[in-house]
Image: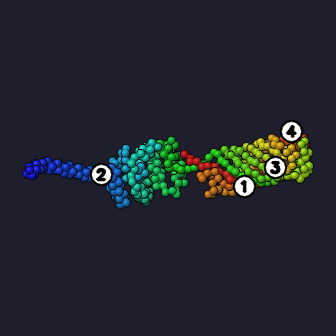
Amino acid sequence: MEYFVSREKSESSPSVYLLFLFACLLSVHYGLGQTSGSNQISTSEKIEKTRKRLLDAVIEDNLTNISILYQALSKLDDENYLAIYPGEEWLIGYWLRDYQVILDGIGAYDSAFLTTNGMRVQPSGDYLIYKLKEKIDTRVSELKSQIQTSSYSEEQKDFLALNLDYLLYSGDNQEQLNSSANSFLKNHPNSEYEDYIREYVRYEFKPSKWGFSFEFFSGYGVFTEDLSRDFTNNVPIGIAFDVFYKKYVLFLRNYIGFSRTTNAIEFDGGTWQEDAQVRVFLPEASVGYTLVDSKRIKFMPFVGISSTSVSPTEYDRNRIEEYDKVGLDFTTTYSFGLNMDLVLGKSGSVPIISWNEEAYWFIRLRYSYNQPQFNKKYEGFEGNFHYITFGFGGFGRKLKRDY
């Protein structure tokens, strides 16, 4: 019986060996396939290696290698991968005197181009752009001389020189860059490079047409005619907000004057006692025009409409019941006068309306002549009202990019 058993096992063993051998072959084949695949270099790796070699060539001033590696890098640039940035390509173009790659690149440099670039795989961070700037910055005069001896038009040569300054911009020469850009735009009106220069090269600001200011003030107010008989002159406190548009200004002011009655005043509902506290309210809206606008002084005549009331204090009204029926209620008032602002200086690090603004502090002297119409409502209360105020405030216009 054991014989047959052992014989039965020996007959099945070749199949087991074959299966085992087949499995080994599959494993070897799969392993070789994996090894072969791992030797393939990805596009990202090719770009990174080529950029490193190009960086070495730039550091070594090896123009031959720079040219060869630049061409190799350009071939790796496609719809999926960005191999070299435009600024890097243009700086190399200046170095190799390949000006056409710069002029062609400028023509394609718009928002659609930038959007497409942003959707591609970007190169990993390296120092290529910094080393290019460092090397080219030492030979700017030489490169500009080469540009001038080229066969391009005067407009193209002027643009190439301007664009080289822009690419080498270090943050402290923007004023000079703006001056050069403005000269180019003046000398070459309707240039095909105008949009690029206005968008990227020239970086100037201009104040907005709209401006805003605020003021805190005090001063002295004087009544005339019947009003001066019944009330003392007053000392005000107030606040103002102004809205400017070009040279026009809307003054919004709230004048609160402190006065007293000089004698007992009879009204239909009661008597306002002598030496009682008086509040003069004069909310105002007037329109002015900036007649003089120098660095140190501004003159702004104005005319407007306001409303005046001369009344007991809220405290006295709560104490004395009949005071609810005394006083001169709000009535239409015509106002006109002159503002003189003395400019103290720029606001510095303290923003008035915006962090990016044209702003200054000022002291304001204001004279106003006001004509309340109390006599139309109350008999025996004719008279007008003059005041002079001294105020301190701030003015600001937001700065906007001037394209």
Q: Residues within 10 Å of mark 3 (few under 14, many from 20)?
A: some
Distance (Cα) linking label 4 and label 3 = 25 Å
Q: Residue at x 37, y 47 (%)?
A: 81
- Secondary structure of the residue carrying tag 3 is helix
Do we see residue 239 in this rendering? yes
Q: Which residue in the structure is indicated by mark 2?
A: 41
Horizontal side of 167 relative to 311 (left or right) equals left
Badge 1 or badge 3: first in the primary sequence? 3
Distance (Cα) linking label 2 and label 4 = 96 Å
Q: Which residue in the structure is indicated by mark 4?
A: 376
Residue 175, image x, y percentages = 54, 54
Q: Residues within 10 Å of mark 1 (few under 14, many from 20)?
A: some
Q: Nearer the viewer, residue 316 or 344?
A: 316
Distance (Cα) linking label 2 and label 1 = 71 Å
Distance (Cα) linking label 4 and label 1 = 36 Å
Give the quarter of the figure containing the C terminus.
top right
Q: Do the residues under discs 1 and 3 have CB atoms within 8 angstroms?
A: no
Amino acid type of the residue tagged 1 in the rendering: Phe
